[in-house]
Image (spheres, helix red, strand yellow):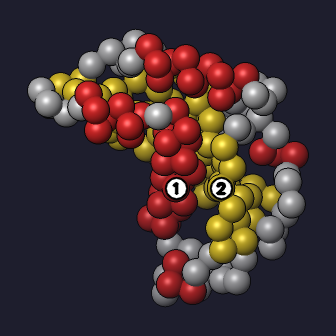
Amino acid sequence: MRFATLAGFPVVVIEDVSWGDMDSFQHVGNTVYFEYFQNARIDYMTRLGWFTLMQHEGLGPIVASTQARFRRPVTYPDRIHIGARVIAVESDRITFEHRLISERWADVAAEGQCVIVSMDYKTQKKTPLPASIREEIERLEAAVKIEKPELQQ
């Protein structure tokens, strides 16, 4: 099942909601959404080859900031579709946008962003974004129609 609201996302991960993802309020706990976003982001960065680069050269990603906006409660059982795309590339960082769609609601359940900084793990300092990563982002994003992020109110 493909949702139109994920059309501009080159990476979409599909997961079943686990019973253990829910909290005492009978819906998925807020911190779990960050894990969902991370799963899609890890898939994206794996496709970029960033973890291979990290193993060989010590240059890898590190989370600088993250945020989420919750729109609808997700509960067990449900299947979710988590999109990841890059919406900004700067000299030493990229910004991901995430969108989570609930099959139960057939709608957006949560949205978020995450800033990832390029890190030299040998020196423990930020470093310019590797050219190979920039090129792979361009290639991956070119595979889908890029739309500007919608202004959220």
Q: In what element is the residue under mark 1?
A: helix
Residue 58 lies, with reference to residue 109, above or below; the image says: above
Residue hosting label 1: 39
Three-letter code, disc 1: Asn
Q: Viewed as shown, does residue 142 lie left or right of 56?
A: right
- Quadrant of residue 73 in the image? bottom right
Image height of 85 relative to 108, above or below? above
Spot occupied by residue 27 in the image (x, y as percentages of width and height)? 59, 79
Q: Position of residue 7 (x, y in %)?
A: 82, 40
Q: Is residue 144 above or below residue 110?
A: above
**Dot 2, crowdedness within 10 Å: few (<14), some or many (≥20)?**
some
Q: In the image, residue 63 lies at what x, y percent?
A: 35, 40
Q: Is residue 136 above or below residue 8?
A: above
- Name the residue: 58% across, 81% down: 18
Image marks 1 and 2: residues in contact by CB distance under 8 Å: yes
Residue at the spot x=14%, y=30% of the render?
Answer: 122
Q: Is residue 148 visible?
A: no
Give me the residue at 56% from left, 74% from top.
Answer: 28
In what quadrant of the picture does the C terminus appear?
top right
- Asked where in the image residue 22 lies, by quadrant, the reply is bottom right
Q: Which residue is tagged 2?
A: 13
